[in-house]
Amino acid sequence: MNINNAFPSQYLKASDLGTSTVTVTVAHVAIEPVGQDKQQKPVVYFEGKKKGMVLNRINSKKIAELAGTTETDDWSGVRVALFATTTEFAGDTVECLRVKTPPVVRKGTAPVPLPPVLDIEPDFTSTDDSLDSIPF
């Protein structure tokens, strides 16, 4: 068993992506109580995905840059690429999620289709690293 799967979360976390980079489309942003102290934070939700991603300043700035606006109400339809990496926090190296510009489809080439959205529970016992195994 992967220990990261022993602690499920209603929000997207780095271990949900593993080594995959996933291109998604923003559906909407909501302000929600997050964490043990229930601090109000922005959470971005993606089309066809159940889990939202709690936004931090770095990821918020990148999505605003890609959207061309800081108004989160105008972020719907913006495509972003999500990936897991690490960062320094309180003197420790921790996993985190980051946002980057999605791959550009060049004129005259067919777009790469996104995997189908399945409305099933994730199989945490699978060791398949394909995009279909990403449980969010």
Image (cartoon, grey):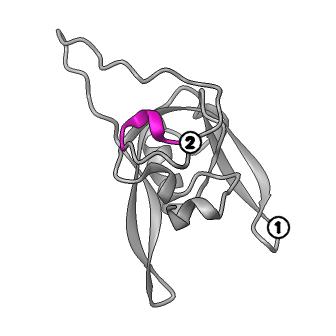
> Residue type at mark 2?
Asp
The residue labelled by disc 1 is 38
Q: Secondary structure at mark 1?
A: loop
Q: Residue at x 54, y 67 (%)?
A: 3
Q: Is residue 103 within the magenta segment?
A: no
Q: Viewer-nearest of labels 2 and 1?
A: 2
Q: Residue at x 59, y 56 (%)?
A: 55
Residue under label 2, please give it.
123
Q: Is residue 87 left or right of residue 116?
A: left
Name the magenta segment's main secondary structure.
loop
Between residue 121 and residue 56, name the one nearer to us: 121
Pick the front one: 96 or 39:
96
Position of 87 compared to 46: left or right?
A: left
| Residue type pointed to by label 1 | Lys
Q: Which mark is residue 112?
A: none
Q: CA distance from mark 2 to mark 1?
A: 29 Å
Q: Is residue 41 left or right of residue 108?
A: right
Residues packed near mark 2 inside 10 Å, few (<14), some (14 to 19) or many (20 plus): few
User: Is 2 situated above or below 133?
Assistant: below
Report the magenta residues as a range.
Answer: 129-136
Looking at marks 2 and 1 on the same chain, the residue that comes earlier in the sequence is marked by 1
Residue 56: image quadrant is bottom right
Q: Position of residue 42 (x, y in %)?
A: 69, 53
Which residue is depicted at the point 50% across and 45% down? 64
Task: Name the outermost residue toward the bottom.
Answer: 91
Q: Residue 19 at what x, y percent from top left?
A: 34, 52
Q: How many numbered marks does the figure carry? A: 2
- Residue occupying the point 38% across, 69% down: 86
Q: Quadrant of residue 102?
A: top left
Could you tell me residue 109's position as x and y percent?
19, 12
